[in-house]
Amino acid sequence: MVRQWLARLGVQTLYIEPGSPWENGYNESFNGKLRDEFLNGEIFYTLPEAVVLVEQWRRLYNTVRPHSAWGGLPPPPRRRSNHRLGSSGCPNSRDRRWLNV
């Protein structure tokens, strides 16, 4: 259905090989972390249980867990000003002042 709609609009899509970190590095990196750090260690018996556990992991991932983009530090709290951050919310590689926050 989506492919037909895109074809009617004249939009062409690119094929990305599943599991190809060369073509889709950011998503493949996140998928690997989700699988290795969370999914491989959990068994879900109900959908509500899965929702609760995924939300707990998401909060841990976004607030506590160290990230390579932050130099091995967890992301800063949301209440801090984002004036030093790039549009993605990660530190601007040309501006290393974020380490002094």
Image (cartoon, rainbow, N blue to C red):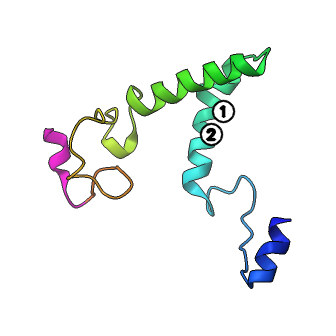
> For residue 32, which numbered disc appears in the image?
2
The amino acid type found where label 2 is placed reads Gly
Direction from residue 43 to residue 67 in the image, left or right: left
Other residues around mark 2 within 10 Å, as few (<14) / some (14–19) / many (≥20): few
Q: Is residue 43 above or below residue 54?
A: above
Residue 5 placement (x, y as % from top left): 80, 73
Other residues around mark 1 within 10 Å, as few (<14) / some (14–19) / many (≥20): few
- Helix, strand or loop at label 1? It is helix
Residue name at image x 57 percent, y 46 percent: 29
Report the quarter where the N terminus lies. Answer: bottom right
For residue 70, which quarter of the picture? top left
Q: Which residue is mark 1?
A: 35
The amino acid type found where label 1 is placed reads Arg
Contact between marks 2 and 1 (CB within 8 A): the answer is yes
Direction from residue 56 to residue 95 in the image, left or right: left
Q: Is 69 covered by the magenta stretch? A: no
Q: Nearer the viewer, residue 68 or 74?
A: 74
Numbered marks: total: 2
Residue name at image x 24 percent, y 48 percent: 82
> Magenta residues, as a range?
94-101
Direction from residue 76 to residue 60 in the image, left or right: right
Q: Nearer the viewer, residue 52 or 91?
A: 52
Residue 30 placement (x, y as % from top left): 57, 43
- Helix, strand or loop at label 2? It is helix
Q: Is residue 67 above or below residue 87?
A: above
Q: Nearer the viewer, residue 71 or 91?
A: 91
CA separation, marks 2 and 1? 5 Å
Q: Is residue 48 above or below residue 95?
A: above
Direction from residue 36 to residue 11 in the image, left or right: right
Report the quarter where the C terminus lies. Answer: top left
Residue name at image x 33 percent, y 36 percent: 75
Q: Is residue 79 above or below residue 97?
A: above
